[in-house]
Every structure is written in C-alpha cells, then in structure tokens.
Amino acid sequence: MLALKLHQLKKTYANKIVALKGIDLEVNQGDFIGLLGPNGAGKSTAIGIINSLVQKTSGTVFINGYNLDTQSSLAKSQIGIVPQEFNFGIFEKIIHIVMNQAGYYGINRKESAIRAKKYLSLLELWDKRNEVARNLSGGMKRRLMIARALMHEPKVLILDEPTAGVDVEIRRSMWVLLRELNKSGKTIILTTHYLEEAENLCDRIAIINNGKIIHDTTKRQLLSLLNSETFIFDLREPLLGKLPLCDGFIIKQTDSLTLEVASDQSQDLNAIFMFLNTHKVNVRSMRNHANRLEELFLRLTQKGEL
C-alpha cells in the first residue's frame, strides 16, 4: 500500500524561481526513506507542501490514499511532522504540550493522558513531564518534538533534520528509536544533512537537486554506483621505506603508521591484504576515507557524474 504519493508536484515562486519541477515520488507503507539534497534543492518546499504550509503551483499529494486537496483533514491525520525548528511554547509544561497536540486531532483527555505517558516514556521524557519546555536541553527538545508528532499515532512520520545540533550520544540513541518505530510499521521520511545518518537508517534514498529527483532507489543499488573508494589502513608498526606499485590499487603513505589506498569496484580487497602481508605490513584497522553515501552524494549533486 502507498503511504505517500507525490504526482507532478511543482512550485514556482513570484520571482519565477522554480523550487520544484514536477517531481514524482511514491513511498510504500513501512518504508524508511531518506530525502536528500543540497540547500535550496527543494526538500523543504516538498515537505512544506505535504504539511500544507506551502501552497503548490500544481500536482497532487495523496497520503494513505487521501487526496490532500479534497480530503484535507483525513490526509493530515495520517502524518506526523517533526520540523527542524522548535515550534512549541517554551513556557508550557511538557505534559501540556503533548496532550494539547492530541486534542487538535479530537482525542479525549483520558486517551491523551494514556498516550502522553506512552510516548514521553518512549522518548525518555516522562520524568520531565512537569518541567517547562525552556528548561530542556537541545536533545530533549528534539525528543519532545517527536513525542508530540506521535500523539495522534500517524501512519507516516516526516522528520526534517531531527538530530540537528545534538551531540553524538543523543543522535545515536535517536537512531535506535527511529529504527524501532520503523520496525513497528511506521513509515518514515527523513531529511538530513548528516549523510552517515541516512546511510545507517534508510533503506531507500531519493536525491533532489535543482527541483528534480535525480535518483530514487534502494540504498544498496545507489551505493553500487560508486565505482571507486578510498580506504585508510592504520598500521601496527611504522612503515620504513616505500612500498612498490600494486596492480589495481593506488597506495599513498600519509605518515609512517597510515596508508591511503584507492580502489575501483572491480578490485578484490583481498588482493591488497595479500600484497601488504607479502611486504610484512601489519594492519591494525581499516576504514573508509569518507562516508560512502556522502562521497556519492557530492559526485551526483556537484559534478553530475560518478
């Protein structure tokens, strides 16, 4: 079943800037999709249209089969939005923020209280329920935004930069939560500038550039387009002297304990390990020089080539 369908969605502003150029996107129920693109590509405009904050020029939006134009209330009830900016009353208590949100969707106070405990506990905020929002840390405010978006139990959760400005520990804990929500059946659409985040969480990636979707495929298929990678080898012992050439690989010694090895997709990495072993090079660890999705994203959006 389709959770979200955008058909020929277009948005042109008064200054004739075209933010969206007739995009098509179909998101299946249970998908975890990353909507990626450089600043100004059209991501925020698309999300703004879905949550009715931006008026489209043309096209249609269906959310769980409901037409956003003709069945607005039903369509909006299917989605929960976690915007990038904090937009709750900073002097309100947390418990009131989430319960009032439920009230906007016609949920009675008794049920609202049950859901408030459920989702504030899930987001590890129940003990803070009587605190005013201004006293929360940045990470807690982010979690409050997610709890609020879940109160009417939407089928589709849209998160716009949900981990912006939080530390690594909080970001990783939020990743665990989002994975659990997705496993429970929640459809998630994520925009993020942390490409590592998209690679870790999303099963599918759609890339918007200059108002058009230039790629929409599974993460595995997208990463297969990366025809070369660079790896960093950390050595256990200093390398003395220069290594000879190795067929199929470009090896650069950045310091006595580090090698940088460039390889294309046709090469078997076992060959480089055999080569290093032959020359008595003892490897302690190996890692990608850059996040794979980040490297591919930059090639696709900046150069237009792989």
Image (cartoon, rainbow, N blue to C red):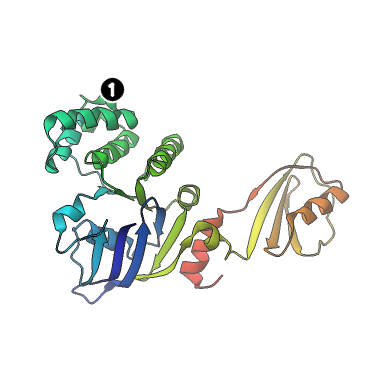
Residue sitting nearer the eye, 1 or 50:
1
Residue type, mark 1 in image: Asp
Residue 149: in sight, yes or no?
yes
For the image, the number of numbered tags is 1
| Element type where label 1 sits in the image | helix
Left or right: residue 238 compared with residue 82: right
Q: Where is residue 168? Give x, y as percent.
A: 46, 38
Q: Is residue 115 above or below residue 17?
A: above
- Decide which of 105, 49 is in the foreground and name it: 105
| Residue 263 in picture, x, y percent from top left | 70, 61
Give the image location of residue 2, x and y in percent.
Answer: 33, 58
Q: In the rendered image, which quarter contains the C terminus?
A: bottom right
Q: Name the residue under label 1.
A: 127
Q: In the shown orientation, is residue 169 left or right of residue 67?
A: right
Q: Which residue lies furthest to the bottom in this view?
A: 16
Query: Can residue 93 be seen?
Result: no
Circle 1 packing at 10 Å, graded few (<14), some (14-19), many (20+), is: few
| Vertical placement of residue 22 versus 147, above or below | below
Left or right position of 98 against 269? left
- Residue 35 figure quarter: bottom left
Residue located at (30% from left, 59% from top): 4
Quarter that holds the N terminus: bottom left
Residue 98 picture quarter? top left
Q: Residue visible at 54% across and 62% down? A: 221
Farthest residue, direction front: 1
Q: Residue 233: percent from the left, percent from the top? A: 71, 48
